[in-house]
Image: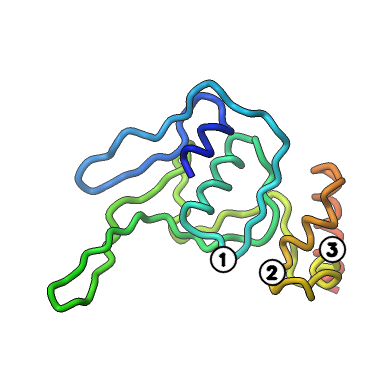
Amino acid sequence: MLPVLDFLLPEGDMLIRRSRLADPPPSRSDAACWEIPMLVLVNRGTYGAAEYFAAILQEYGWASVMGAPTAGKGYEQTHIRLRDGSALWLSTNEYFTPQGRSLAGTPLRPDIPIPAESRASQVLMHRSQDNTLAAAEIRMNTTVEEQRRLAAEEEDRARG
């Protein structure tokens, strides 16, 4: 995740990790970056690195995030194999965005929400159980402002 973010972001912090023992320095991006319009799709199955990837791009204002709230996982886990063959997963670090926000227990909220009952999800639902991609296909050629307006209208229709 970090090499891709470094390629996309301007110079600055990318990911901050905090530990009970010692906080490693933040992962940083260099000044070289590729400025392109981006839309990141997320849903409740988005967690861990993918969740932070979207959150970091969102914080920098380099991508709009569209879909449903994410899982809200914000911990690095270490796998410890025990002598009896079982294993223990131990949370060893907590992740934070460049602005110091943890997603642990707090889902990432999309800029452009896609309601489960939206027209976009109903039109293309047969292609996937996930409506995020279907909604993205419908909205690919619209502006961010228009996307927000459409999402609000669909949400109002879904509420009845």
Q: Amino acid at mark 1?
A: Gly
Residue drawn at (44%, 49%) of the image? 102
Question: Under tag 2, what secondary structure?
Answer: loop
CB of mark 1 within 8 Å of CB of mark 2? yes
- Residue 29 at x, y percent in the picture: 47, 29
Residue drawn at (51%, 33%) of the image? 6
Q: Is 55 in front, or is 155?
A: 55
Q: Earlier in the sequence, mark 3 or mark 1?
A: 1
Query: Which residue, given by chain and number where applicable, does mark 3 sit on?
Result: 154
State the separation of the CA atoms marked 1 and 2: 9 Å
Query: Which residue, given by chain and number where applicable, does mark 2 sit on?
Result: 130
Question: Under tag 1, what secondary structure?
Answer: loop
Q: Amino acid at mark 3?
A: Glu
89 shown above or below 103: below
Q: Residues within 10 Å of mark 3 (few under 14, many from 20)?
A: many
2 shown above or below 125: above
**Residue 93 as seen in the image, left or right of residue 104:** left
Question: Under tag 3, what secondary structure?
Answer: helix
Q: Residues within 10 Å of mark 2 (few under 14, many from 20)?
A: some
Query: Looking at this rendering, what residue extends furthest in the top direction?
Result: 31
Q: Amino acid at mark 2?
A: Asp
- Residue 17 at x, y percent in the picture: 35, 43
Q: Earlier in the sequence, mark 1 or mark 2?
A: 1
Which circle, 3 or 2, is nearer the viewer?
A: 2
Residue drawn at (73%, 60%) of the image? 133
